[in-house]
Amino acid sequence: MATGMVKSPPSKSRNKSRSRSRSRGRSTGKSSRSASKSPARTKSKSPSRTQSKSPSRSSRTRERTTVVKKEIVVTPTRQSTRIADLVDNEKKVSTRSSELLKSEVRNNMADKKDKAKPAAKTRATEFGGPVGALFITLSLPLVMYYINLACTKTKCTILELPKFPKNIWLLFDMEATLLFFGWLAFQAVLAMIPVGRVVEGLPLPSGKRLKYRCNGFFAFVASLIAFGICVYFNVPLVKMVHAKFFRIMTSAILFSAILSIFLYIKARAVPVTQLAPGGNTGNALYDFFIGHELNPRIGSFDLKFFCELRPGLIGWVILNFIFVLKAYQDTQAFPPALTLVVAFQTLYVADALWFEQWSVVLAIQDAILTTMDIIHDGFGFMLVFGDLAWVPFLYCLQPRFLLDNDPKLAWYSLAGIALLNVFGYMTFRRANSQKNEFRKNPFHPSLADLESIPTSSGKRLLVGGLWGMCRKPNYLGDLMMALAWSLPCGMSLIPYFYPVYFAILLVHRERRDGAQCQKKYGSSWNRYCERVPYRIIPYVY
């Protein structure tokens, strides 16, 4: 057909060819027009048009395709970027609240478990069982009165029975009662002030973690400031407390008994998973003494955590300061022995309250939150009486003795006693710091030289440093400080009641702790005992 188009046919055939080309043009469009042109045009112009116009059209087509592709590619990329940003923001938010969510989930699951678990009865008892619990409950208040009444301004001996007042009502006083309850209320308000960090305690048997606000050191400083304000404005606090010491102590003893009864009644209504492991024997007398509920609370206010450190320990320091100021009012001087002992005991209490908060900052949750009192013992008469009555009114025995009986020791004797207290405190603090750091991260570079024994539970037992000398080096430091507090009192026996009693207490606590570790770690604990044979005093015990 193309060859027929090259020749010059007559007009009729040209017309026919045109008509044919038109008829084909209808079906082929523009291609038929280029086919009907002369060879010259086909050779010269058609290629030039094809070369000149076709590339421009194809380039525009490619540009449009590229634009379309860019739109197709770019739009999802922008969308995915926005989505990624949103996801990142959500991750940041979820990271900040993850601990709270986990805590809520654990607590919700724990609440469900509370209803499902049967009650686990306590089989093994301590302190002689119910009979021993009854004896201790009745004898502890009598011991407090005996020790404090036996040491007076005229004499201080344990060999003679003290003179109890014939009229027992002389030990009660409304003003003294108001002073005691005012002190409790003041400490409760300080404990609820939102100062200090909130930390979760160790898991309970149900898996639930309770939250604690650690602002004990804040309460300690605030209490000292409030006491200073009272002294500055001549509030007769010193004279009043010193004169009504026994009556305030009586209020503390009676309130401890009433609070213990309330706690036992309250514990009868809580889920069994909230009961103390050692205080669920079914015997009312024994459970009342040991503590039936592990962590009794009124709303979010934890009664055991509050009483462990606040009113008793801080009250102990305030009583000591009152004795020092009373001595200054009487003699216009600060007696060296009395001042030294008060400084020792103030440092001890400040350390306990400071590391209650500092342990939270280090995220190790140790100090008070991992002591046996918090994680194992219930809150019954044993701890209530000890926290509110025994500690503040019996641990101040040495300062109260030195207020009335100053042995006037030489400066070098006081210097030696001070060195003993410093060495004891350094042992106590270093041992606790090593333990805290090891619990936080056993593989910390600072602990690289300390040996440890692995256990089946995944934890490790520290057998290096001070903990390689004996199993309770912190108890050893405690005993050295207790002795340093009594030595300034000279040769009188009654002030040495504290180190003797404290030694018995720590030996008993070490035995209890060892029995629990034996059950928990098994053969690993046996290897630990072979590696560290001494319990508290190296080469002695």
Image: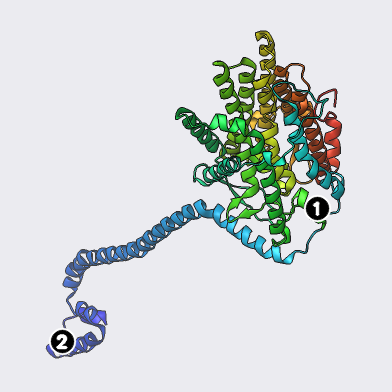
Q: Residue furthest front?
A: 167
Of the numbered discs 1 and 2, the one sitting upstream in the chain is 2
The image quadrant that residue 341 belongs to is top right
Q: Amino acid at mark 2?
A: Arg
Mark 2 nearby-residue class (10 Å; few <14, some 14–19, many ≥20): some
Q: Amino acid at mark 1?
A: Leu
Quadrant in which the C terminus is drawn = top right
Badge 2 is on which residue? 14
Tell me residue 19's x, y (percent).
Answer: 18, 90
Tell me residue 74's x, y (percent).
Answer: 35, 60
Element at badge 2?
helix
The residue shown at (73%, 26%) is 151
Tell me residue 158's x, y (percent).
Answer: 80, 26
Element at badge 1?
helix
The residue shown at (67%, 12%) is 408
The residue shown at (65%, 38%) is 247
Residue 212 versus residue 414 in the image, above or below:
below
Residue closer to the observer: 408 or 13: 408
The image quadrant that residue 175 belongs to is top right
Judge from the rendering whether residue 198 lies leftward or rightward of residue 142; answer left or right.
Answer: left
User: CA separation, marks 1 and 2?
Assistant: 131 Å
Badge 1 is on which residue? 285
The residue shown at (69%, 28%) is 397
